[in-house]
Amino acid sequence: MKKYIFILLASAALVLTSCSPFQVRSDYAETANFTTYKTYKIRIDDLKLNDIDKDRVLNELSRQLQTKGLQSGENPDLIVNVKANHKKVTDINSSSPYGMWGWGGPFGWGVGMSRTWTSNYNEGALIVDLIDSKTNKLVWQGIGSGISVDSPKAKQRQIPEIMAEIMKNYPPQRK
């Protein structure tokens, strides 16, 4: 019995730690040979963030690229283009009218009230494009969304987390 409880608890812990609040996806060119890429240079022309968030993104991106075995260089194999955007999100929630007054359970008659409320917030996304410097073609793209743009404390924690999640998919595992 103890064995089954341990397996159940271990499974629950694994599920909880593997859940991510972010939506991350990536795509890559089938013809790209990712083993030939050794150096990179970050281009930030499209990175429209405040200086604090820009530093967070660039520091974590550089760290992630270096853990993948890439080194920064002036004559790079890859051009890394980073973009950021955000959108307004409206969540609509409602409550069921059951449970106030009534006879005969949920199918009887009585008085009930339903409530609907909305919440508005901004959700941010980061996009990382890896471009082959020789061909000037996109070879890999990672996109992560779900950053709480309205909360400075959340951004401070989430930007490194989402960048790590995005870069988990590089280099791609060919099928």
Image (cartoon, helix red, strand yellow):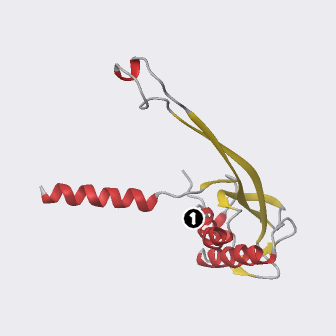
Residue under the image location 65 percent in, 65 percent down:
34
Up/down of 115 relative to 90, above or below: above
SS category of the residue bearing label 1? loop
Q: Position of residue 12 (x, y in %)?
A: 33, 56
Q: Position of residue 173 (x, y in %)?
A: 55, 57
The residue at which mark 1 appears reads as 168
Q: Position of residue 43 (x, y in %)?
A: 83, 71
Left or right: residue 33 versus residue 76 is left
Q: Position of residue 70 (x, y in %)?
A: 66, 77
Left or right: residue 47 versus residue 64 is right
Up/down of 48 relative to 21, above or below: below
Q: Is residue 38 visible?
A: no
Residue under the image location 44 percent in, 21 percent down:
110
Q: Is residue 121 visible?
A: yes
Quadrant the N terminus occupies: bottom left
Residue furthest out toward the left? 1
